[in-house]
Amino acid sequence: MKKYNQMILGGAISAVLLILVLYLNHHFPQLMGLWFLLFFIFDLFIYYWINQNSSE
């Protein structure tokens, strides 16, 4: 059950980050690649964090 909750939390954080990326992209289109790269790195970090905590 703990892993399930972490997956929901991770998904929620990812959704918020994606909305933030799209918002920043709308206001600073010249930095589009940077925003999506940051989102991808954060997404990988969240996925890694969920897997680390669920293996215990």
Image (spheres, rainbow, N blue to C red):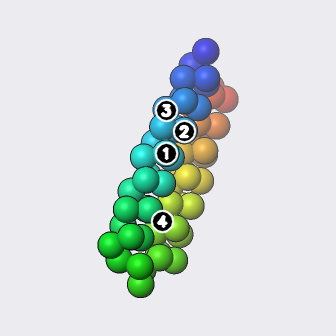
Q: Residue furthest left?
A: 27
Mark 1: amino acid? Ala
Q: Earlier in the sequence, mark 4 or mark 1?
A: 1
Q: Earlier in the sequence, mark 3 or mark 4?
A: 3
Cα distance between the residues tagged 4 and 2:
16 Å
Q: Earlier in the sequence, mark 1 or mark 3?
A: 3
Left or right? Give the position of 31 relative to 36: left
- The kind of secondary structure element at disc 4 is helix
- The kind of secondary structure element at disc 3 is helix
CB of mark 3 within 8 Å of CB of mark 4? Answer: no
CB of mark 4 within 8 Å of CB of mark 1? Answer: no
Residue that badge 2 annotates: 11
Left or right? Give the position of 13 relative to 2: left
Question: Residue 53 location, x and y as percent?
Answer: 57, 31
Mark 3: amino acid? Leu
Question: Residue 24 location, x and y as percent?
Answer: 36, 67
Mark 4: amino acid? Leu
Residue that badge 1 annotates: 15
Left or right? Give the position of 54 relative to 24: right
Residue that badge 3 annotates: 9
Residue that badge 4 annotates: 38
Cα distance between the residues tagged 1 and 3:
10 Å
